[in-house]
Each structure stands twice: as C-alpha cells, then as structure tokens.
Image: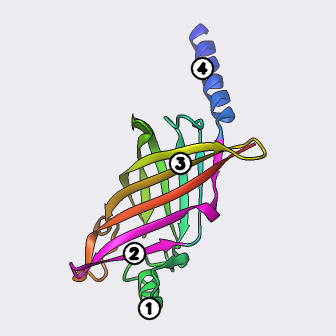
Amino acid sequence: MKKNSLLSLIIIMFIAVGADAQVWKIDPNHASIMFNAKHSGISIVNGRFMQFEASVTGGTPQDFTGAKVNFTAQVSSISTGAEGRDKDLKSANFFDMQNNPTISFVSKSFTKTGDHMYKVVGDLTMRGNTKEVELSANHIGSTKTGDGLNKVGFQLTGSVDRNDFGISGASGSVAPIIEILCNVEMSEQK
C-alpha cells in the first residue's frame, strides 16, 4: 500500500510541475520559417512558409533545457517568389497539399550543448511521413517588454533529405538535401 501511495504522490508532483511550466508563443511578425534547396547543382532556391503556429512549453529566459516544442505550418502558404513553382510544390509532385495540408514538428528533447546552443530532436511530419530530425538552436537573447513580460529569440538550423518524406518531385534538378532556417521570437504567456 505504501508503494502505491508513493507512486501516486510522484505522479501528482510531475503533473503539477508540468501544469506550472512556462508557455511561450511565437510572434509571427518577428519570425520566419525558411528553406533552401540546391537547383541544377548551380544555384540555391529559397522559400518560406507564410502561415505557421508554434509554442514552447518549459524553459526560462536563461535556459531552455527540457523544453517542449510544437510547430505547424500550412502548406498552402508556401512562397518561393515564383507562382508556378509554388503551385508545383503544393501539388502531388511534392507536398501533396490536398491530402497533407500541414507540416508539423513535435520535439522529443531540448538539450543544452554549449553557451546559448541547444540540440533539438523531434518528429517532423511532411506528406504524411514522420521521421526523427535534429536541429541546432542558437538562443540569440532574452529581454523584457514594457509590460514586464519576457521575450526570447532563437535561430534554428538543420537539414533533411526530402526523399525520406516521399517528396521526390523534380529529382533531376532539385537536390535531395534541404536546409532549414527558422528565426523565431517568442513571448511568455501569462
């Protein structure tokens, strides 16, 4: 009976700690979710997602070890500066927007690797396929707003092989490795 009582107390403590974890919301006016792809082996084409949502649970303005990240981007908002290319990227040749309208990322770990640097590991889902990816996160800085709330900034970088997600269109002209670059500013939520 004592073991059950102790186990119940530990579970309640974990739930209470999770309930008190700080929630951070991304500021879409001060954030960008971008990608780069090598084209024909001679140039780089870049693009971005114009509509996305993200939140981080846990962390402090000084340390985000153990934080949890949730991110979703709308495939319909992809923009590369070329209307025809955007239409092709939304088609079944690439992201298959009709059947897979979003791209999502859910973190599994957020580990400090050095001064202001973190390794973020999580599940990325594109075109209905989920693979574990690793991103590098640079904690650029923290500040307080005029109303006393904390704001933090991060830059996340990494790369994925688009073929791992079934995104194999234009295989002859678009390189398989896609670079990811995310700049985010987040505010604590009260």
Going by the image, does 35 lie left or right of 38? right
Task: Identify the disc placed on residue 17.
Answer: none
Residue drawn at 32 percent across, 61 percent down: 160
Q: What residue type is labelled 3?
A: Val
User: At numbered mark 1, what does the secondary structure look like: helix, strand or loop?
Assistant: helix
Circles 4 and 3: CB distance less than 8 Å? no
For marks 1 and 4, the one nearer the N-term is 4
User: At numbered mark 2, what does the secondary structure look like: helix, strand or loop?
Assistant: strand
For marks 4 and 3, the one nearer the N-term is 4
For marks 3 and 1, the one nearer the N-term is 3
Report the Cα–Cα distance between label 1 and label 2: 14 Å
Report the Cα–Cα distance between label 2 and label 3: 24 Å
For marks 4 and 2, the one nearer the N-term is 4
Judging by the rendered image, the residue that carries numbered circle 4 is 10
Report the Cα–Cα distance between label 1 and label 4: 56 Å
Q: Nearer the viewer, mark 4 or mark 3?
A: 3
Report the Cα–Cα distance between label 4 and label 2: 48 Å
Q: Where is residue 23 in the image (x, y as percent from the top left)?
A: 65, 43
Q: Which amino acid does label 2 sit on?
A: Asn
Circles 4 and 2: CB distance less than 8 Å? no
Judging by the rendered image, the residue that carries numbered circle 2 is 46
User: At numbered mark 3, what does the secondary structure look like: helix, strand or loop?
Assistant: strand
Pointer 3: residues within 10 angstroms few (<14), some, or many (20+)? many
Q: In this picture, is 38 found above or below 67?
A: below
Pointer 1: residues within 10 angstroms few (<14), some, or many (20+)? few
Judging by the rendered image, the residue that carries numbered circle 3 is 69
Q: What residue type is labelled 1?
A: Gly
Judging by the rendered image, the residue that carries numbered circle 1 is 84
Q: Where is residue 110 in the image (x, y as percent from the top left)?
A: 45, 40
Going by the image, does 16 lie left or right of 58? right
User: At numbered mark 4, what does the secondary structure look like: helix, strand or loop?
Assistant: helix
Out of 155 and 91, give the one closest to the viewer: 155
